[in-house]
Amino acid sequence: MSAPEQRPAWKALTRLATEFGRRSLSELLADESRNAALALAAPGMLLDFTKQRVTADVVQRLVQLAEQQDLAAQVERLFCGDHVNTTEDRPALHTALRARSGERPGETDAAVAATLSRLSAAATALHRGTLRGYTGKAINDVVHIGIGGSHLGPELAVEALGQAAFGGPRCHFVANVDGEALTTALRGLNPDTTLFIVVSKSFSTVETRVNAVSARSWFVERTARLDALHQHFLAVTANVPAAVEFGIAEDMIYPMWDWVGGRFSLWSAVGLPIALTAGADAFAGLLAGARDMDQHFRSAPFASNGPVLMALMGIWNYNFLGAGSHAVLPYNQRLRLLPDYLQQLEMESNGKSVGLDGSAVGVHSMPIVWGGEGTNGQHAFHQLLHQGTRAFTADFILTAQPEHQLAEHHRWLLANGLAQSQAMMAGQEADDPHRRVAGNKPTTTIVLDRLTPYTLGSLLACYEHKVFCQGVIWNINSFDQWGVELGKRLALPIHDQLGGAAAPHQDASTRRLIAHLRGRQQE
């Protein structure tokens, strides 16, 4: 595949971007035919691109760019199980996790079906009270220990779906190796009624391993029952022997597969806390929403394809209009963790500087993703969005119907969300320059019918496919993360050196910091 900047469509888009400095969003919104083409329905949601700085001509050229980068064929390769993860020589088959039985490629069908059956059975047993601790008491609390993709997706989904609404146990998430995280999660818990889930593909991830060992010590110290570990510890891993050695019964271990990356894994057994807290039906609804978005993505023409258009708007903003960051602004309290989740999904996937052939990427790839919940963000960082000097783009996520009965609150929430996107679009003229707001900031508004397992699944799958499309267009591999491994490797000797080992080969700065920390710890 060629570098994108060599494509005719890229060169045409470069010319259009030069001309676009004279076009305002307010002017573009006067074209109703344009607006109608840029507001489209997708499973469970409306995707409104009308406040993006695009014309029909720009969209046409962006679609041509996707075609010239062979996006349609790459989409089919993704779904069919081809080795789209080229540097690790394996497929990326997260879509198989939510596909219907018989529609999954290769040998994934039986493995996925068996795992989903086990998840459903565990969730049903816990909700019916037949899954109990070693003393016969019902499970009231679940402590989930993981990090990165093993943590961010499940935590987002559990909070978004609302634990109390489904009558399941409380779920406490521990990711940070900082002892404060585990201490806080365990505070006030009863070991007799607590279930631990340890999630690590290798079962050797440092943060997860350290937290799991400390959690096991906490449990054994309070119960004096090593044999009770079998009823209170589950694992999700590809390294079954290591989990068994840790003390977890083999029938309490759920699989992880090489063909599912961590940040795409919440649909698998990694989503066990979602099923346990929200129930088997809710987890099935999550998968159904993602499956319907998969079908939309795979079949809809590019010009009316939600994930493809999200990707193309990003390409236009990042590569042609100079946006260096992307703000995610959910106007729903239960989606407050969405920016954190998307930071990993987008930046770990597409934060690359090397193309598929190993040569340097000739264009900018993923910008910084950040954000926060509305309306809190309006009183924190929106000032920069309205009057700052940096170019950015933003997604507003709204829900048409609330999950509560306070209708007036919800009207104010929606009014603020719409007003903020309007202010970013139109700006404000004023004689006083301090009050002037430039406007002309491109945003997308996503309106969920309401926040349910189905619409959450559809929303997250939409972002997954957006990431894949942008990777194809930039000609990079969205499914590896070699940069993450460097810091992990460097931490190993530093850990030993902080404990007293010699550090002769460290750089001068790190060596001095190690000496300072050791000195302070010994006081």
Image: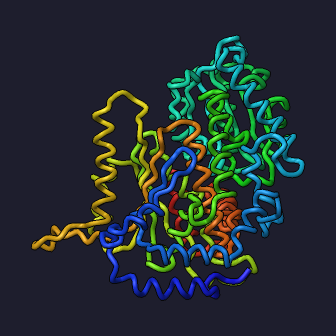
Number of marks in picture:
0
In the figure, is residue 227 to the left or right of 36?
Answer: right
22 vs 507, nearest the viewer: 22
Q: Position of residue 459 (x, y in %)?
A: 56, 48
Which residue sits furthest top? 136
Colour convention = rainbow
The image shows residue 385, relative to residue 152, as above or below, that is below
Residue 419 appears in the figure: yes
Quadrant placement of the N terminus: bottom right
In the figure, is residue 430 to the left or right of 224?
Answer: left
In the figure, is residue 314 to the left or right of 204?
Answer: left
Which residue sits furthest front? 33
Q: Which quadrant would residue 506 be assigned to in this image? A: bottom right
334 vs 100, nearest the viewer: 100
Residue at image position (53%, 34%) is 161
Residue 500 appears in the figure: no
Residue at image position (44%, 78%) is 322
The image shows residue 98, relative to residue 81, as above or below, that is above
Which residue sits furthest right? 107
Q: Position of residue 214 (x, y in %)?
A: 65, 36
Q: Which quadrant would residue 114 be assigned to in this image? A: top right
Residue at image position (68%, 46%) is 291
116 vs 173, nearest the viewer: 116
Q: Position of residue 302 (x, y in %)?
A: 61, 65
Q: Position of residue 435 (x, y in %)?
A: 16, 67
170 vs 136, nearest the viewer: 170
